[in-house]
Structure formats: structure tokens, C-alpha cells
Image: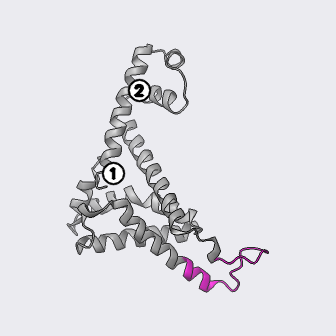
Amino acid sequence: MEWLTTTTVLDRLHDANDHSAWSSFVERFRAPITTFSQKQGLNLADAEDVAQETLMAFLESYRKKAYERGRGRLSHYLFGIAHNKILLARRKIAGREIQVSTGDDGTSFWSAVPDPTQAQEAWEREWRQATLVQSLEQVRQEVSSQTYEAFRMVVFEHLVPAMVAERLGISRNAVFIAKHRVGARLRDLCAAFNEEQ
């Protein structure tokens, strides 16, 4: 799939007939919302529902111009919606439960809900992770497998360039070039992903 900046995706969301824009938006933002929701205590099915409801609520508010792109970070706006949807889901779950005790110590279902500050920190971690994962996947498609592997071994495995060069059968200079090239492209992609922030 073609890499689009977040600005481009949002611009295209105004057109209700542009289904590929919606697909791009969902592909980009569903995973961090789902993972965040699970880490806030929801099971996978409920977390996926929260992600869908969050994205639909954003789309509706965006098309009504409730979200003003210049007034705040997109990630913060999505967090606010997701956090509220998670709290609503927890209320529904609690209403379905006959007993909401989480253990023998008498703690309640609600005592397991992190405070807003902890939730915000957890959201920021998920957002950074999603940005990195999607940007890495894109850069992996753009460079040769050897270039990407050299970058991965130096950056993620923390191997010295000489060892990477030996393992891949390339020069140390080629390893340095790969690290620089992929790193620079990765920074550009992460910036494009977070362009609205």
C-alpha cells in the first residue's frame, strides 16, 4: 500500500466516497487503540470494538469540524475519545458482571482502572510503538533486504559494524551507509506519520 502522510489521509477523509482514505486511516490507527484498550483491561473483542467506535467517533467529529488540526495533537484527540470509550466499555462490562470483585483482597473492577495520567503515559508508549512499527515496515519495503538487515543488526541487535559486514559479506562502509540511509528515511516516515501533531 502507498505510504501517505497523516495530513493526506485526513484531507481525504472529508470525502465520504473515498473508501481508501478510511481504510488508510483505520490501518494506521486501529492497532495502537486496540493495544492500548487491552492494556487498560479490556479483552481483545471489547478492545477491537473500542477501536472501531473511537475511529468512527473521530470521523464524525472531524467531518463536523470539531477537530481542528492546528489546535492540538491528533494523538491527544484520539486518546481522549479512546479513553472515554474504554470507560464506557468498562461500565458495560461491570453491569454484566454479577460480582465485580477482582480478587480475594476485595478490590473492585474499577480499582484496576489506571488514573488518567497513567493512561496518558500508556497511550504515548503505544503511539510511539505504532509509529515505529509502521514506519519500519514502510522503509523495509523501500530498501534492499541487505540494507535493511544491516540497519537492523546495528540498531536493534547492537552489533558492531565490522561484525555486521562480515555476516552480510559487505564492507564496513556499506554498513555505515545502510545505517545512515535507513535511519534518515525512518525519521522522515515517523515525522510524516506524526505530521498532524
Query: Callout 2: 10 Å neighbours few (<14), some, many (20+)?
Result: many
Quadrant including the C terminus? bottom left
Q: Secondary structure at mark 2?
A: helix
Q: Is residue 195 left or right of residue 92?
A: left
Residue assigned mark 1: 194
Quarter where residue 188 is shown: top left
Q: Residue 31's mark?
A: none
Q: Residue at x 58, y 68 (%)?
A: 114
186 relative to 73, above or below: above
The answer, for residue 99, to whether it is visible in the render is yes
Q: How many marks?
A: 2
Q: Residue at x 55, y 69 (%)?
A: 115
Q: Position of residue 133 (x, y in %)?
A: 45, 46
Q: Which residues are magenta?
A: 90-109
Query: Callout 1: 10 Å neighbours few (<14), some, many (20+)?
Result: some
Q: Residue at x 29, y 74 (%)?
A: 61
Furthest toward the front, the residue is: 117
Q: Position of residue 87 (x, y in %)?
A: 51, 76
Residue assigned mark 2: 179
Q: Residue at x 65, y 77 (%)?
A: 109
Q: Secondary structure at mark 1?
A: loop
The kind of residue tagged 1 is: Asn
Prevailing secondary structure of the magenta residues: loop
